[in-house]
Image (tube, helix red, strand yellow):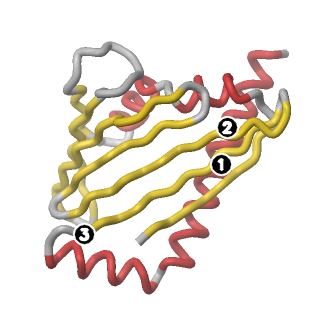
Amino acid sequence: MEIKSKATLDVPIEDVFATLSDFEGYERSALRRGIEVERLDTLGGAGVGAKWDLKFQFRGKDRQLELELVEYNRPEEMVFKSHMQGLDVDSRVELVALSRTRTRINVAADLKPQSLPSKLLVQSLKLAKAKIAKRMDRKLAGHAKDIEDRYRRSAG
């Protein structure tokens, strides 16, 4: 099952990519939300092979997610592979420069169940796909607005 979303920002592509690849910022944000984050690689920054182990509670159960950055093509694309209890997810973040100061973000997540419980989960998600896509659109739009606001503050 694939879920897609997109947003357009009035920010140059390099600045959008720099913000999206600020993994240390995402780690701090996750920690503030009660997610345990462990960086498993020794890169010390962004790049192919960056890897994390995340532990969190979801729907009353402890979950563990392994996340790895498998493609990193500055400033156009990042591809992640993740695995969580029988569910593999391939995620792609693609940036397209619409002009010198305008960028489109395309995000896609492809869920691939590997076990019976994850197949049942994905099947139930398919029934709510429109609702999930709308929620993803709202989240991406909010993140895009944050990036624009941050860019305006730093440029002004």
**Disc 2 secondary structure class:** helix
- Identify which residue is drawn at 24% across, 55% down: 57
- Identify which residue is drawn at 55% across, 32% down: 20
Query: Mark 1 = which residue?
Result: 142
| Vertical position of residue 77 compared to residue 129: above or below | above
Quadrant in the picture for the N terminus: bottom left
Badge 1 density bin: few <14, some 14–19, many ≥20, Cα 10 Å: few
| Vertical position of residue 1 compared to residue 88: above or below | below
Q: Are marks 1 and 2 in contact (CB under 8 Å)?
A: yes
The amino acid sitting under disc 3 is Pro
Q: Earlier in the sequence, mark 3 or mark 1?
A: 3
Q: Earlier in the sequence, mark 3 or mark 2?
A: 3
**Disc 3 secondary structure class:** strand
- Identify which residue is drawn at 35% across, 36% down: 70
**Mark 3 or mark 2, which is nearer to you?**
3
Determine whether, in the image, residue 122 is placed left or right of residue 153.
Answer: left
Relative image position of residue 131 (x, y in whole percent): 55, 76
Relative image position of residue 58 (x, y in whole percent): 27, 60
**Disc 1 secondary structure class:** helix
The amino acid sitting under disc 1 is Gly
The amino acid sitting under disc 2 is Asp
- Identify which residue is drawn at 45% across, 58% down: 109
**Which label belongs to residue 146?**
2
Query: Mark 3 = which residue?
Result: 113
| Vertical position of residue 97 compared to residue 6: above or below | above
